[in-house]
Image (tube, rainbow, N blue to C red):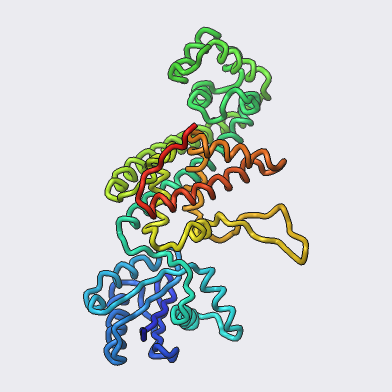
Amino acid sequence: MEQLYVGIDVSSTKHAAYLMKPDGDKFSSFPMQNDRSGAKMISEKIVSALTKLGLKDVVIGMEATSIYGDNLVYALREDGNLGRFHRKIHVLNPKQVKNFKKSYPDLPKNDPVDAFVIADQLRFGRIGKEVYMDDYRYKALQTLTRARFYAVQNLTREKERFANYLFLKCSGIAQSKDIPNTSATTLALMEHFETVDELANADLNELTAFVNRAGHGRFADPEATAKLVQAAARGSYRLPKTVNDSINQVMSASIAAMRALESQIRTLEKAIEKQFEIIPNTLISIPGIGKVYSAGIIAEIGDICRFTGQASVAKYAGLVWTQHQSNEFEAEDTRLIKSGNRYLRYYLLEAANSVRRCDSEFRRYYDLKFKEVNKHQHKRALALTARKLVRLVFRLLKDNRLYKLPEG
């Protein structure tokens, strides 16, 4: 099939386009603005080239460069003039393009050359798995699930910062294994008591009542918890007043940030669940996976027919181990590949961690892998459990069937 190949090098303000004939010869190249006029310009030039060459098929490709090419993809997808032709739009993994360019060692690094490399890679057909999915339902869901991913990462970092502040203000509570550093009770204690001495010398009955309220009645023995908190406070370092006041200020800001992020995550999860209702899937039949984790997986996979098998899904997610082998030597300690879709990998790992607690087969598999080695036990067992989950996810989506719990 003879096709026109269009490579586009994307940036925040300007794009560079390269139109290549079916035989690999240059048809044209030109710069354009990253706005509506630029999108209209490239559409008109593609239509003109197709008409002059007597072609009906065009393959358009660009690198996944943050968000800077998304609007152009939508514009080309919705363009009525291009709609008269058979078009394919690929957003390519930058690492694949970079590796392909290595086959041209003498090429300089500039935008027109990069556009040529993309067009030539399209012509050879070795484009791997494209990043772009043309079903907007998946893209809308992906926007929400990725926003949640970043909110969770930010919350984790904020909790780590708060734990450092907590150690400075009340080292005993920070060191205690029985008092979670960022629990609602700990946050309330740090907000209420200005100094460690106030906490250490508080009336036990009043402190017990405070702990019970802050913990929303979840403590089986609030008085024992209060005594534990007070003992931790008494064994803590004392800060100079000036330093203590500054720590109180940054802790207050950190607590406000954590609460805001938690609220943001709840809002996003409600939006994810609502958007997920319009996408048919069978993953929520897996015990423990839930709507949010299912949505995170579906949003990145899209139509399962894009993948040839479960192994290609695992590779796309980066759940594949590097091989270190020479002659008869083969390393036992290997790592996951560094490439892959980090959002899909994250949601698969989170889902696997949840599923192993609810499904006996996955729990046995995790425990078996955990006991096989003496280091990296949890990370290794969880990654292998996620790899096992990939096989189940692929089969359920491919066959469009529900998961049945194993007997026993």
Toward which corner of the image does residue 369 lie, by quadrant? Answer: top right
Q: Nearer the viewer, residue 224 or 365?
A: 365
Q: Nearer the viewer, residue 39 or 239?
A: 39
Residue 4 position, x and y percent, is: 36, 84
**Number of residue marks:** 0
Horizontal side, residue 276 vs residue 201: left or right: left
Residue 373 position, x and y percent, is: 70, 42
With respect to residue 247, does 330 lie above or below?
below
- Residue at image position (44%, 53%) is 394
- Residue at image position (56%, 61%) is 339
Q: Nearer the viewer, residue 134 or 281?
A: 281
With respect to residue 112, does 157 lie above or below?
above
Toward which corner of the image does residue 201 lie, by quadrant? Answer: top right
Horizontal side, residue 396 vs residue 323: left or right: left
Horizontal side, residue 238 vs residue 220: left or right: right
Residue 271 seen in this snapshot:
yes
Residue 261 seen in this snapshot:
no
- Residue at image position (29%, 92%) is 52
